[in-house]
Image: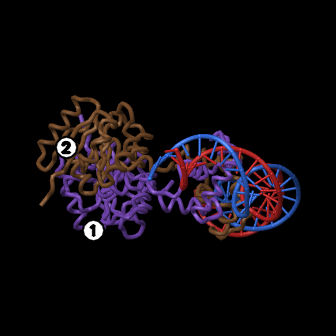
Chain colours: A purple, B brown, C blue, D red
DNA sequence: AAGAAATACCCCCTCGAGGGGTATTTTTCA
DNA sequence: TGAAAAATACCCCTCGAGGGGGTATTTCTT
């Protein structure tokens, strides 16, 4: 037995909104409860709609999609939110995911992928279009060419965790003086003279 | 015009190795150059094989898959590495991605997905099986219930970047004394008495 | 109207951070 | 095998950042 999946669409482009609705209702087991053109329009009725999945446009008038996610999650803690957007902006993607989106699709995906994404989200997957997945994966990748040696990188990773020099020394079984030397060398290589500046440089260059 | 995609398989289960080879060679445009049972076996011949895509098992005898990635990347900087594994371990996933893997599949995916993944990787996508995608997405999600207020969270995020109290004060346009007060309150709430301990707690609880 | 959050100021003291050196041993790699 | 790079360790120094003790006002929220 499988229950009907109740779906709400929040999308300000009425043509797209309609297209999605059609598309989804052609899928057995899927039912579009309501469509809205803004989060404000949806806000009061969402709880009553009780959707299992919300398709959420990012570029919305009023409250934008990313900011809307936590508000939707508050109203519907169990709902899966799938983002729809034309742009592929890192900050937007990570913001949406951090705010609790379950999936992220660019609008150029074929319609079959949207149906698939809803199924995936329902079964605990994390639907993403290829472009988004590639951006997300790249965000994990560390730079291979860093001026820092292995040990130096290790130490800076510990610095990035807020560890003090003597804590680092203890954990690495080396003397405090050695850690000091390493950090001095690191600062010289990076042309900085403080932890925060060093971390800034290293994060910009994807070293840590 | 599209070139033949040269593929190398590194997989110690010979039955699987064979199955993948069959599967891939049934796909027009795909050609399995060579198969190996360990990274050591592949090492010397990889450069000559010159594959565009490497299917890499994680559970390998000798050098494991995750450690093999940077070595493969060094030999073949342009090759796409797609990981294959039966387990879904966070550390393994993030380690592989950080080391430069382009995609990550669990072995329970249907064979058609493997072909699709190779296509995706070639076209700049980031193929992931649903389970992996879900884990990756979850890793971005921040906890919604934190004992810290908005301002306090903001300050701790800056602390996590290695910023000093006066740097934080400057950036937030508030007095150093106010930052001190906030941090004192934060330590009290978290029951800690140092930056590193506070960061440890907050990262464990996915607050920052 | 009450409570939480954000702001700000006072006192204190310790030790961590950063900069100046020099030197030895171990690894790596050409 | 022999030079270069990395990792180790120690000396000197100063300054201020970090952490703990208070109290108090203003501004949001609800």
Of residues B47 and C10, the one nearer the viewer is B47
Q: Label 1: few (<14), some or many (≥20) within 10 Å?
A: some
Q: Compared with residue B17, is residue B102 higher up or lower down, i.e. above or below?
A: below
Measuring from the top left, give residue A153's x and y in whole percent. 55, 51
SS at badge 1: loop
Residue hosting label 2: B33
Q: What number is the disc on residue A200?
A: none
B67 horizontally vs B31: left or right: right
SS at badge 2: strand
Question: Of tags 2 and 1, which is closer to the observer?
Answer: 2
Rounded to the nearest angstrom, the CA distance separating label 2 from label 1 is 49 Å
Do the CB atoms of the residues marked 2 and 1 lie less than 8 Å apart? Answer: no
Residue hosting label 1: A13
Measuring from the top left, give residue B175's x and y in whole percent. 71, 67
Residue drawn at (29%, 31%) of the image: B12
A137 horizontally vs B182: left or right: left
Q: Using the rendered image of the protein, determine whether residue B64 is visible from the camera's viewpoint.
A: yes
Q: Could you tell me which chain the residue with mark 2 belongs to? A: B
Q: Using the rendered image of the protein, determine whether residue B191 is visible from the camera's viewpoint.
A: no
Q: Could you tell me which chain the residue with mark 1 belongs to? A: A
Query: Dividing the image into 4 quarters, which one contains the N terminus of chain B?
Result: bottom left
Q: Are marks 2 and 1 on the same chain?
A: no
Image quarter of residue A3: top left
């Amino acid at each position: 037995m499988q229950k009907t999946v109740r779906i709400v669409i929040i999308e300000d482009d009425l043509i797209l909104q309609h297209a999605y609705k059609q598309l989804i209702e052609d899928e057995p087991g899927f039912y579009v409860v309501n469509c809205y053109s803004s989060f404000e329009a949806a806000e009061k009725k969402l709880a009553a709609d009780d959707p299992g999945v919300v398709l959420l446009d990012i570029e919305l008038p009023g409250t934008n999609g990313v900011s809307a996610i936590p508000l939707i999650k508050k109203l519907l803690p169990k709902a899966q939110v799938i983002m729809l957007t034309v742009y592929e902006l890192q900050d937007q993607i990570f913001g949406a995911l951090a705010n609790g989106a379950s999936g992220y699709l660019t609008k150029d995906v074929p319609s079959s992928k949207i149906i698939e994404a809803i199924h995936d989200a329902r079964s605990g997957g994390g639907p993403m279009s290829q472009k988004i997945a590639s951006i997300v994966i790249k965000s994990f990748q560390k730079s291979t060419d860093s001026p820092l040696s292995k040990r130096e990188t290790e130490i800076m990773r510990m610095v990035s965790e807020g560890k003090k020099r003597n804590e680092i020394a203890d954990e690495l079984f080396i003397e405090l003086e050695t850690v000091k030397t390493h950090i001095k060398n690191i600062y010289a290589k990076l042309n900085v003279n403080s932890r925060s500046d060093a971390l800034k440089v290293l994060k910009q260059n994807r070293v840590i």
